Image (tube, rainbow, N blue to C red):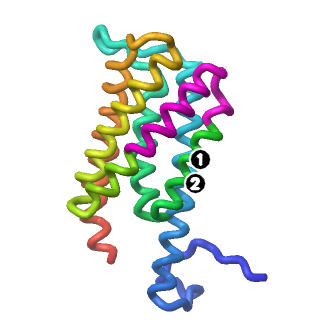
Amino acid sequence: MTTQHCVPATTPHNRREPSEATAHRHTCLGFVVLVAFATTVVIANWASTHWPVLLVGSIAVPAGTAWAGVTLTLRDLLHEALGGRGVLVAIMLGAGVSWLPATPQIALASVVAFVVSEAVDSGVYARLRTRSRVGAVLGSNITGLVTDSALFVPLAFGSFTSVPGQILGKTVATTLTVTVLLVAKPTRRVMR
């Protein structure tokens, strides 16, 4: 039995056909993004449970919010690397790991909000992707962050008080991740 490693297609150790090497790179990239996705879900729930709420003016921003916002973009990247089935696996994995670091109330709220918002986010991304990758990430993240916030906050904290803070934190995270995608886009073209 041989073990395949995630090596670039241009190394002397990789003698595969170009299309096979490209598929292997996508699978490796998908695995890396899947691990990052699961990690950010855990960090978001842990931070929501153990870190204090941040105050931005009069808006209360739960500490895990920015991490939850990053998961929205990572989910879109998973869609690119692994397709719809990979996204379904990621959503199920994210829902499962939501239980690890959080209190039962936050974990349940996270699972419900996560599954619904990620499904909505994924649907919007798939529809918008044919027009523009960055536009799809932006549109799906906005839809996902509003859906997630409107579900998570009342289920986790028993009120809608932190919804504006959730939306603010996730919007900041979306802005940062979309900026990274825009900056990385020219780099990818040069590398090809």
Q: How packed is label 2: few (under 14 Cα within 10 Å), some, or many (20 or more)?
A: few
Q: CB atoms at circles 2 and 1 under 8 Å apart?
A: yes
**Residue 59 x, y percent position in the rendering:** 32, 13
Query: Which residue type carries mark 1?
Result: Met
SS state under label 2 = helix
At horizontal 33% and vertical 74% (from top left) the residue drawn is: 191
Task: Let me know if residue 15 is in the magenta part.
Answer: no
Q: Which residue is mark 2?
A: 89
Q: Which mark is residue 175?
A: none
Which is nearer the eye, 1 or 154?
154
Residue corresponding to mark 1: 92
Whether residue 181 can be seen here:
yes
**What residue is drawn where x is 31% and y is 25%?**
168
Q: Which of the image's four quarters has the C terminus?
A: bottom left
Left or right of residue 31, residue 68 in this image: left
Region in magenta = 98-120
Position of 130 compared to 51: left or right?
Answer: left
Q: Is residue 183 visible?
A: no
Image quarter of the N terminus = bottom right
Q: Residues within 10 Å of mark 1 (few under 14, many from 20)?
A: some
Q: Which residue is painted at 46% across and 35% down in the image? A: 67
